Image (tube, rainbow, N blue to C red):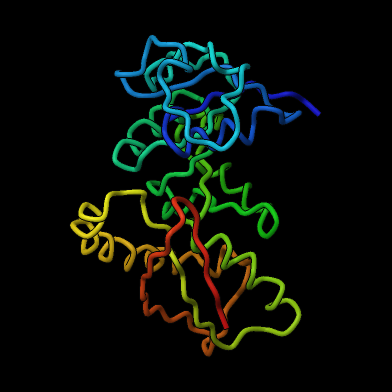
């Protein structure tokens, strides 16, 4: 198996750190470039990051010099993983794709684009063929792949075996979102805003959800959403139940 040289965008953030932890010892990937904000650029990664993962900061990346998230700094990579915040991900990821550098993104910005696959390899690996219809570059060297959001991924992976074995008539889902580790007063002050955000989190993905499951729904099979967001104590993660 070829070893791919990769870069990570948003490397100092929580998602970027997760990418580093999961990929550091992977036999397929070598982390060569780290991108973050201008505030972090020019510093070795160990000086730029506030490491929050439960493992030690990997020594292989500790001394890599952080750059800004411009494609001109990533010419030597095969592709990048993007842990960028959605407030900046759209423009930056498009710049990379148009520069011929493929992007595998955790951000929401391109999820609803028809030619961008919402990829869960265990369920829909053939959807990767959608990148052939993307037009970021004339030679198709630049493309974007995304994952579904944190509710749709476990929901899709849970529903697919049930659909294969028994079919699906209806689904009721309750999702529980992790609460940030904020002081109580700040948490209370942001609670109303959080409710608004979480209520719409699943709904925009409905038009792609059956495609994600590789299901051709009958007219009787309708996905109805009545979001009721709840919070629970852990710092990171999500849990849900369905019936």
Vertical comparison of 153 with 89: above or below: below
Residue ID at (36%, 14%): 41
How many numbered circles are shown?
A: 0
Vertical comparison of 94 with 228: above or below: above
Residue 99 relative to residue 121: left or right? left
**As drawn, which residue projects farthest toward the front?**
184
**As drawn, which residue projects farthest toward the right?**
1
Residue 79: horizontal and vertical position, in percent? 57, 27
Residue 124 relative to residue 185: left or right? right
Which of 144/65 is in front? 65
Q: Quadrant of the C terminus?
A: bottom right
Which of 130/199 is in front? 199
**As drawn, which residue projects farthest toward the left?**
189
Residue 92: horizontal and vertical position, in percent? 36, 30
Which of 83/105 is in front? 83
Q: Quadrant of the N terminus?
A: top right
Residue 134 relative to residue 228: left or right? right
Residue ID at (50%, 48%): 116
Which of 136/145 is in front? 145
Vertical comparison of 215 with 232: above or below: below
Residue 48 picture quarter: top left
Residue ID at (43%, 58%): 178
Residue 217 picture quarter: bottom right
């Amino acid at each position: 198996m070829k070893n791919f040289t990769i870069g990570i965008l948003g490397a100092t953030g929580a998602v970027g750190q997760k990418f580093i932890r999961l990929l550091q010892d992977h036999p397929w990937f070598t982390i060569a470039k780290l991108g973050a904000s201008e505030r972090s650029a020019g510093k070795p990664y160990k000086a730029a990051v506030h490491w929050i993962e439960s493992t030690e900061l990997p020594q292989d990346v500790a001394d890599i010099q952080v750059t800004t998230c411009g494609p001109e700094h990533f010419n030597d990579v095969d592709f990048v993983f993007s842990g960028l915040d959605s407030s900046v991900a759209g423009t930056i990821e498009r710049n990379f794709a148009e520069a011929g550098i493929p992007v595998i993104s955790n951000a929401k910005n391109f999820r609803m684009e028809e030619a961008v696959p919402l990829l869960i390899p265990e369920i829909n690996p053939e959807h990767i063929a959608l990148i052939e219809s993307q037009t970021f570059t004339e030679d198709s060297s630049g493309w974007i792949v995304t994952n579904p959001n944190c509710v749709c991924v476990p929901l899709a992976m849970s529903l697919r075996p049930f659909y294969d074995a028994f079919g699906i008539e209806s689904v009721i889902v309750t999702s529980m979102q992790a609460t940030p580790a904020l002081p109580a007063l700040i948490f209370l002050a942001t609670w109303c805003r959080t409710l608004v955000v979480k209520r719409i989190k699943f709904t925009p993905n409905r038009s792609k959800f059956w495609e994600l499951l590789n299901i051709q729904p009958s007219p009787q099979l309708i996905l109805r959403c009545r979001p009721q967001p709840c919070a629970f104590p852990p710092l990171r993660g999500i849990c849900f139940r369905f019936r």
